[in-house]
């Protein structure tokens, strides 16, 4: 027998989709405050939100008539002309207040600018009380007590108060990033967890949320509707926890955008390291569907591949503009690792009178006899007058067979010659590979790869693109393909695993970037082996030529694995080490 569910049961079901944990309720109510034009939002919680949550704002407030409708299911002031594909507000579903009221004890107090009094309404376990006058300033205050008291089975799924508080901090930080012109505070009892005052620009808010180091070690992005900031490759983390994506101001989770970031940083970072970034995509609301998830944490793009390509281009352009720049935190760690040393009051009598500054003792200050040619000989002719100013300065010494010391106008540079030359070699090999027709090798024994029919169809639809990268495949019966040619750079390695990965990637994202990533990995490996090794003594012209090539080569501030190729020590920091400032 089919029956119509009770309204309160319907609200509780909706609550299970929308209000997963205390942070979910706070997210919905803070979004309501933002839609109401609030410039000051204050959140107070107790016991990680399980006992009490209070959200106060100075927004437009609600009249008694609107307050009466607010906790009803599917009532909203944000959906104009019933157009679900032209959403310009944070909220629009009209489920949050009804859902919260069905599982908790909720009191809403609100006052408009033209009203002499505020009005209050209580909803407890789905039962709505009467509207009554109360004291209050312009704006809205929502007080939630005993969340999930009406659905006790849900309580056992809550985490510890500490974990719940961490989730609340995270959601408010995300909301604050897209609204730097709004102040946000978060307290647990009397302890202040967050205090983000109103700021004039995004970068200032980013520094407040992600730290000042991010501001110093990030590049600005502004490219065809994609804006924000992304960290230099040398400023990275071990997970994606600090990657934020916003579409029309709404923070979302999207595997497509994560993949775009991976592609943009593919040969700048090790596979297990991740950049820090906050990207804002401004798009016509008609080109994105925000109504695909109850919690509004996911969206569907009308042209997903175009968005992915746009994000990749935006990131690459910004990173390319950073040229040879490396993270300042590397230099900070170097300076902080130094400690003052003091000479003894008297020297040992058996101490040598002098120590020669020779290569055997780790020093090199002048040109040495000719050396065998490097894999990619430095263009020493590009080294110009010592009177000219260069970003990476002029070489002064060679230490321990691997480190170049260069003097700049503002201090000194310490270069890891192997890491630096690895990047230079990689960029040169990559440019040569993609600038010409890809060299192919015909397999003496073609590889037969068994695949499902849908996988074969997918591969064959990308046959032309594969051909551009030097891969020639043909159908082999109804359940396999035969690989006849592969890029020569693959050497004698089997291509089967790469092809299987390609099929999965084609079906998931519809592009060929997996193959490009694999090719770049091989080039990177060859560049590492083809680079000048540690222990190779360089002449002064060779050292200066390396510095000039670094200045002219994109991404030379880090090796292919995201490690810095040089450390920039400012004169003021060096003087501070010796107590001169």
Image (cartoon, helix red, strand yellow):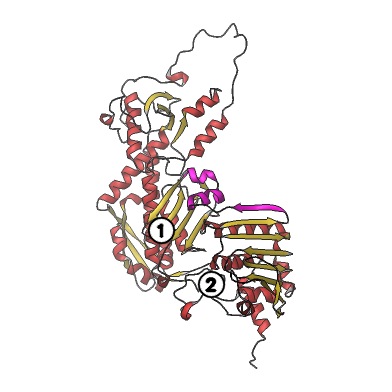
Q: Is residue 52 left or right of residue 310?
A: right
Residue 23: image x %, image y %?
A: 64, 64
Number of dots carrying numbers: 2
Magenta region includes residue 198: yes
Q: Residues within 10 Å of mark 2 (few under 14, many from 20)?
A: few
Alpha-carbon span between mark 1 and mark 2? 23 Å
Structural crowding at the residue carrying mark 1, measured as other residues with C-alpha within 10 Å and reported as few (<14), some (14–19) or many (≥20): many
Q: Position of residue 542 (x, y in %)?
A: 33, 28
Measuring from the top left, give residue 204's x and y in whole percent: 51, 49
Q: Is residue 109 left or right of residue 293?
A: right
The part of the image, by quadrant, that contains residue 560 is top left
Is 285 situated above or below 560? below
Along the viewing direction, whichever of 422 and 442 lies nearer the viewer = 422
Is residue 50 at all visible to an observer of this figure?
Answer: no
The image shows residue 24, relative to residue 361, as above or below, that is: below
Determine which residue is flagged by label 2: 293
Q: Can you say whether 382 is above or below 215 in the image?
A: above
In the image shown, does 133 or 482 lie closer to the viewer? 133
Return the residue at label 1.
226
């Amino acid at each position: 027998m089919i029956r119509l569910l009770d309204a309160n049961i319907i609200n509780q079901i909706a609550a299970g989709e929308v209000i997963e944990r205390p942070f979910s309720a706070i997210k919905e109510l803070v979004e309501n405050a933002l839609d109401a034009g609030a410039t000051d939002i204050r959140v107070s919680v107790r016991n990680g939100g399980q006992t009490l949550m209070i959200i106060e704002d100075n927004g437009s407030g609600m009249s008694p008539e609107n307050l009466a409708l607010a906790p009803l299911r599917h009532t909203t002031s944000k959906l104009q002309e019933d157009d679900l594909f032209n959403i310009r507000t944070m909220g629009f579903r009209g489920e949050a207040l009804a859902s919260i009221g069905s599982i908790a004890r909720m009191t809403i107090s609100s006052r408009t600018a033209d009203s002499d009094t505020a009005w209050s309404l209580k909803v407890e376990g789905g039962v709505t009380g009467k509207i009554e006058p109360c004291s209050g300033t312009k704006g809205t205050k929502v007080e939630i007590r005993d969340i999930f008291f009406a659905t006790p089975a849900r309580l056992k799924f809550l985490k510890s108060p500490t974990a719940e508080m961490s989730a609340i901090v995270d959601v408010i930080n995300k909301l604050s990033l897209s609204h730097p012109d709004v102040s946000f505070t978060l307290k647990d009892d009397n302890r202040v967890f967050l205090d983000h005052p109103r700021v004039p620009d995004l970068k200032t808010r980013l520094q407040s949320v992600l730290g000042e180091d991010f501001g110093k070690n990030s590049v600005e992005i502004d490219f065809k509707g994609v804006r924000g900031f992304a960290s230099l490759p040398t400023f990275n983390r071990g997970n994606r926890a600090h990657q934020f994506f916003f579409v029309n101001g709404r923070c979302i989770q999207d595997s497509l955008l994560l993949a775009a970031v991976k592609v943009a940083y593919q040969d700048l970072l090790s596979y297990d390291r991740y950049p820090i970034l906050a990207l804002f995509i401004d798009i016509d609301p008609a080109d994105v569907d925000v109504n695909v998830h109850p919690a509004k944490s996911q969206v569907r793009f009308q042209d997903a591949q175009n968005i992915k390509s746009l994000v990749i281009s935006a990131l690459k352009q910004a990173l390319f503009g950073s040229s040879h720049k490396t993270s300042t935190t590397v230099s900070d760690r170097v300076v902080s690792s130094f400690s003052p040393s003091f000479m003894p009051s008297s020297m040992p009598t058996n101490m040598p009178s002098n120590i020669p500054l020779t290569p055997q003792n780790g020093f090199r200050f002048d040109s040495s006899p000719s050396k065998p040619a490097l894999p990619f000989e430095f263009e020493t002719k590009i080294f110009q007058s010592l009177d000219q100013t260069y970003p990476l300065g002029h070489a002064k010494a060679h230490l321990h067979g691997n480190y170049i010391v260069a003097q700049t106008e503002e201090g000194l540079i310490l270069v890891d010659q192997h890491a630096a030359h690895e990047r230079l070699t990689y960029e040169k090999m990559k440019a040569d590979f993609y600038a010409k027709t890809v060299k192919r090798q015909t397999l003496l024994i073609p590889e037969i790869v068994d695949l499902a029919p849908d996988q074969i169809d997918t591969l064959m639809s990308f046959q032309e693109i594969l051909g551009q990268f030097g891969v020639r495949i043909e159908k082999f019966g109804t359940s396999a393909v035969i690989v006849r040619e592969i890029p020569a750079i693959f050497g004698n390695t089997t291509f089967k695993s790469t092809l299987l990965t390609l099929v999965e990637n084609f079906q998931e994202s519809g592009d060929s970037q997996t193959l490009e990533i694999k090719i770049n990995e091989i080039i990177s490996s060859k560049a590492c082996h083809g680079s000048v090794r540690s222990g190779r003594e360089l002449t002064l012209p060779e050292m200066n030529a390396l510095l000039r090539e670094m200045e002219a080569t994109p991404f030379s501030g880090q090796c292919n694995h995201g490690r810095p190729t040089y450390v920039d020590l400012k004169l003021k920091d060096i003087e501070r080490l010796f107590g001169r400032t």
